[in-house]
Amino acid sequence: MPQITGAGGSLAVISPQVARTPRETEEPQPFTYEMLRDFGNRVAESYGLVFTLPDDLREIYTKFGIDLARGNGDADPDYTRRPEPADTVKILEGLRRP
C-alpha cells in the first residue's frame, strides 16, 4: 500500500460479494482502502471481468466449506487471476512521468 500511494495512486476493492466474509468481520483494524460492493457484477461486466469457475474447481471450494453462491450472489471469484502489486506500482509510476 505505501508503494501505491507513494506512486500517486489509491486503492479501492470492488467485490461482488453480497455477504461479509469471516475475515471482514474478524479484521481487527479497518481496511486502509475503500471496499465497494458491485451487486449484480455490473462494473466487472463492463470491464469484461465476469467469468464462471469450472465445476471441478467449484467442488474444491465446496470441500473447503466455501459457499460461492452465498458469498458472491451471481458471481464466482478466481483468486488466481489478480494483477501483481509490483506491476500495478510500475504502471502508476509510469503515469506520473512527464
Image: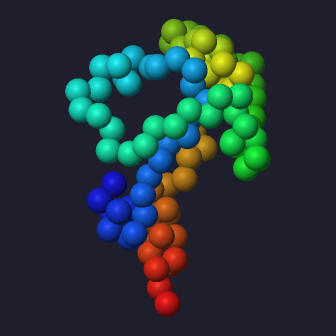
Question: Image height check: is 72 above or below 46?
Answer: above
Choose between 80 and 36: the one closer to the eye.
Answer: 36
- Assign the N terminus to one quadrant of the image: bottom left
Q: Position of residue 10 (x, y in %)?
A: 42, 58
Examine the rendering and report whether any part of residue 77 can be seen.
no
Tell me what residue is drawn at x 73 percent, y 50 percent: 47
Residue 55's image quarter?
Answer: top right
Q: In the displayed image of the protein, which residue is found farthest to the left? A: 28
Q: Residue at 29% across / 26% down in the picture?
A: 27
Q: Please give the count of numbered marks on the rendered protein.
A: 0
Type of colouring: rainbow
At x 38%, y 24%, the residue is 24
Residue 67 percent coordinates (x, y): 58, 12
63 in relation to 11, above or below: above
The answer to whether residue 30 is left or right of residue 38 is left
Query: Is 8 or 91 nearer to us in this picture?
Result: 8
Q: Residue at x 29, y 59 (%)?
A: 2
In the image, residue 58 above or below residue 28: above
Q: Position of residue 76 (x, y in %)?
A: 67, 27
Q: In the rendered view, does 79 fall on the left or right side of 90?
A: right
